[in-house]
Amino acid sequence: MAALRLFVLTLFLAFITLVYLRGQTGGYSSTIAFISVAVAYGASAVYGLLLRSGRMPQRVALVQLVTDQLIWTALIYVTGGVTSGGVSLYGLTCLVGATALGTRGGVVALVSACLAYVGLAIGLNQGLLPIPPDQLPGVYVTTWGDTAYPMIANFVALSTVTGLASYLAERLRTAGGDLEEARARAERAEQLAALGRLAAGLAHEIRNPLGSIAGSIELLGMSPALSEEDRRLCGIVQREAGRLNDLVGDMLELARPRPPALGEVEAVGLAKDVVLLASQSGRGTDVSVSYEGPDELRLNADAAQVRQLLWNLVRNAVQASSPGDEVRVRLARDEGGAILEVSDAGPGIPEEAKRKLFDAFFTTRSHGTGVGLAVVKRIVDDHGWTIRVESIDGRGATFSVLIPKAGLAQARKSRPAEA
């Protein structure tokens, strides 16, 4: 951008010398023109050093816009004053300001141009600025009657250029953000595709021996000849085998998504089943899992996917908890719909991690994989629901699934009484 500015300044200086000064140098106009261009070069060097140091880049850019408009005013003064064709250079700076800094930059450039232009007109009309002696006096207008039309026309033109440039710059920024988001989605899709290819090849190879290991350990643990230490070790192997099985299931679910098969789901019974399962497996022995809510709540959803969603949230809450903590599963009707909440009393989620919490392979735990919550987000999105996270560092976390009215099953009509 700086190189473009200097190029335009140098080109305009050459134009002034050849056209307005007819190749003559050393006079009044040429001195002002050369000084203006020299100041511009010096200011560009200073601005470049400041920008390179990274100190207040926005303010430096705004000061640069104002400086440019003042330099253009000096060149306009020696090339015809208010009626000079150099007034269009104001528009160039307005365009640059809007493109580089958005609406704020465009407005600063426009206001500084208008003030400088009005100041030039006042100086010429009031005799505060002399007409350059080496220029033709007839070119300059020095009465307000002759000045009004070009001033109004130039103000309208500059305002139009600034408005359009600011609008287009904001549209480009929005489009750039959308493009970046689309690129991120494409990368995420490629990751999932790669995961799908990997999971498809390894799922059976992992699950078959894993099932044999889990079955053998379960039988071995029932042997009366084992000591308490042996039983404890068998329990560890069984839990870790279950964890690996869950991981393989999550990876397959994430890599090979299927559209939900909607049907009537009795959410209360499903939630109680998950709570009971979580209480009897993994860390359910040292972290209590409880349910609170109505006795009946029916959803229009995919039962298997809702079970997977709830199991992943409960498992995530249990893993984030410390021994003796409680994980609460809550169902309730909410504003015509329903809400499903899973709360824990763990360390909470850092604010900077919330944005990426549902991204595949992102995790805040050293032993996590970042797959379970990504599956949750996909299931929620496929059902048209919403999920939100409330957490404060050190005070636990609450995952809330908001189910709209359309997600509730229609009440079953009672059959007519038999005679």
Image (spheres, grey):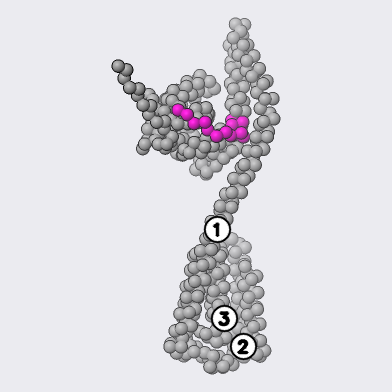
Q: Position of residue 414 (x, y in %)?
A: 35, 24
State the residue at coordinates (52%, 31%). 261
Residue 137 image-quadrant placement: bottom right
Label disc, if present, on residue 173 of the rendered structure: 1
Secondary structure at numbered mark 2? helix
102 or 157: which is nearer to us? Answer: 157
Query: Which quadrant of the figure contains the C terminus?
Result: top left
Element type at mark 3: helix
Residue at x 65% of width, y 23% of height: 207
- Tell me if 262 is positioned left or right of 230 in this view: left
Q: In this rendering, is residue 242 above or below 186? A: above
Q: Position of residue 399 (x, y in %)?
A: 46, 35
Disc 3 marks which residue?
Answer: 86
Amino acid under label 2? Tyr
Mark sitting on residue 20 = 2
Of label 2 and label 3, which has the lower sequence position? 2
Spatial separation of the CA atoms under disc 2 and disc 1 = 41 Å
Judged from the image, the secondary structure of the residue bearing numbered disc 1 is: helix
Disc 2 or 1, which lies upstream in sequence? Answer: 2
